[in-house]
Image (cartoon, coloured by chain):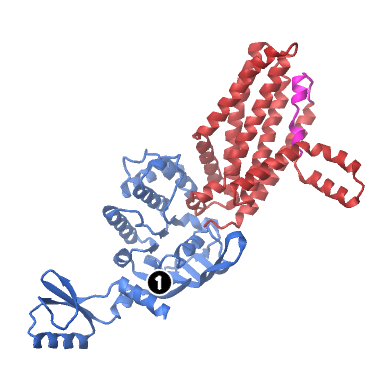
Chain colours: A blue, B red
Amino acid sequence: MISAADPVLQIRGLTKAFRGHLSLGRRMVLRGVDLSVRRGEVYGFLGINGAGKTTTLRIVAGLIFADAGDVSLLGRPGSDPEVRRRVGFLPESPTFHGHLTGAEFLEFQARLAGVPAAGRRAEVERLLAEVGMRGREGILIKRCSKGMLQRLGLAQAMLGAPELLILDEPMSGLDPAGRRDVRDIILRLRDRGVTILLSSHILSDAEALCDRVGILHEGRLTIEGSLDDLLGGAEPAWEVAVAGDPGAETGERRGDRTLIRVAGQEALEALLGRLLAARVRLVSVTPRRPSLEDRFMAALREEGR
Amino acid sequence: MIGPLLAVAQMTFREAVRDRVLYLLFAFALLLMALSRVLALLTVGSESRIVADTGLAAIAIFGVLTGVFLGVSLLGREIERRTAHTVLARPISRWGFVTGKYLGLLLTLVVNAAAMSAAFVGLLMWRGDPVRPVLPALWLTLVELAVVTALALFYSAVSTSALVALLFTLATYVAGHLVWSLPLLVERLTGSGARLVVWAVYYALPHLDRFNVRAEAVHGDAVPIALIAWQTAYGVGWSILLVLGAGRAFARRDLT
């Protein structure tokens, strides 16, 4: 039994290399990833394509075997199949058995998840309603759109009331309305106390959903922390809007205005001094909070040096 | 443990039943049985034998074709389409998954063979030919199907290519029917090394010819119950061994 303070997911020293074509050469994907996800939080696992996010999540889900390192799920070894009863997994760009209807697929998954037969149908109907698939459950999966597949994937991950949800790119393939729906579902799950580990390319979604994020780059977790820590510690920035020509200053022209971005208190004061001296008409000075994307790009630049 | 395994078996059966290829093969088998009547008309004096022989051969050939073609892609298709990802992230072991897939396909083949057998027996009864002599042959064909399907599953687990699995399964199927001739080859060999190799092959391959009692059935000869029981046990033993081997090979396979 684990206490509330213990991490729901603990990864230590995860290493994985894939063999090349015809078993020639080895491509190192993970180089000692350490990660821990606390109970009840939404943890964002970020990184560019090929960083190793999906490999890490598939190792946690038991689909890929690590060369070295440990995975502990809910206080038990990740290799224990029984612990998977308490974990839901949504793979990236999910594909399911095309010959089944959405409802048949969810009932099949419910059996695998160990949902008792008596409550299986009700559970499936509840989840179909939750992901917005009610009324479309009779459509064969091979005829479903990508958005419908993503919703079904989310529903199957939620079967059996898991304590930990692992979502690999849950917003992938969704239109803006679908993304908003999935975001709302994730927030509702968090409110119910479900721990969520999600990977995403869409940093604004991660910023809106996650309590903590980790950035994976070239098989290593390079940055990890709460959003407040990651974004609050950055240098303050402003966006100064001026009417007409800003003189010697460079900025982005938008209609009859020019937007000048500046970072740091001293730089802002100096800019304002120059603009006032040049009698340029100021329209607004807006504090600009650095986004996760800014932090992410800065981390990549630091890594590249 | 058994619940998820049966769920996989049921899903595999449902998938095969909804596959049109299965019905196509079934239709071909029925057509061949119907054609046996035409073939019989062309042959003088052995009409019943031609009908029985053609019918039994059709059931065996189309059963094996179905088992091999569905069997070699049984695991590869799940991996390639990534449909196995949501299944294997559940509390089911790799062994359970492989066994469930095998049992689902076996059930499909049993239903398929039972339907073809029913049509065949109906044809014999309509002609007034004896049915009893063909029953052991029908049963042992089913046992052979179980072994051949397990072979296809085994090769699909150890190989990442369905084509390679298909070639190996067909090669083993042919060799398994010719393995009876290897002791004759040993008698002609002089080198002890070569003899050892041939004996190793003899014992390493399943003796599929043992399941062929069609000649006895066609000629109306009785097949002893003890022989049927022994060959059944032999086939079940090989099937278990091959499914265990497939499970072992699949247990450490990365699903990328």
Quarter of the image with the C terminus of chain A in it: bottom left
Queried whether the magenta region covers residue A86, the answer comes back as no
Residue A298 at x, y = what percent? Answer: 35, 77
Residue B102 at x, y = what percent? Answer: 60, 42
Amino acid carrying mark 1 in the image: Ile
Q: Nearer the viewer, residue A174 or A45?
A: A174
Q: Nearer the viewer, residue A163 or A204?
A: A204
| Crowd around label 1: few <14 · some 14–19 · many ≥20 (10 Å) | many
Q: Residue at x 63, y 20 (%)?
A: B33
Q: Which residue is mark 1?
A: A215
Q: Residue at x 88, y 52 (%)?
A: B193
Q: Which residues are magenta?
A: B207-223
Let me know if residue B118 appears in the view: no
Q: Residue at x 56, y 48 (%)?
A: B76
- Compared with A35, A247 (above or below) is below
Instruction: Label 1: state its secondary structure.
Output: strand
Residue A159 at x, y = what percent? Answer: 41, 50
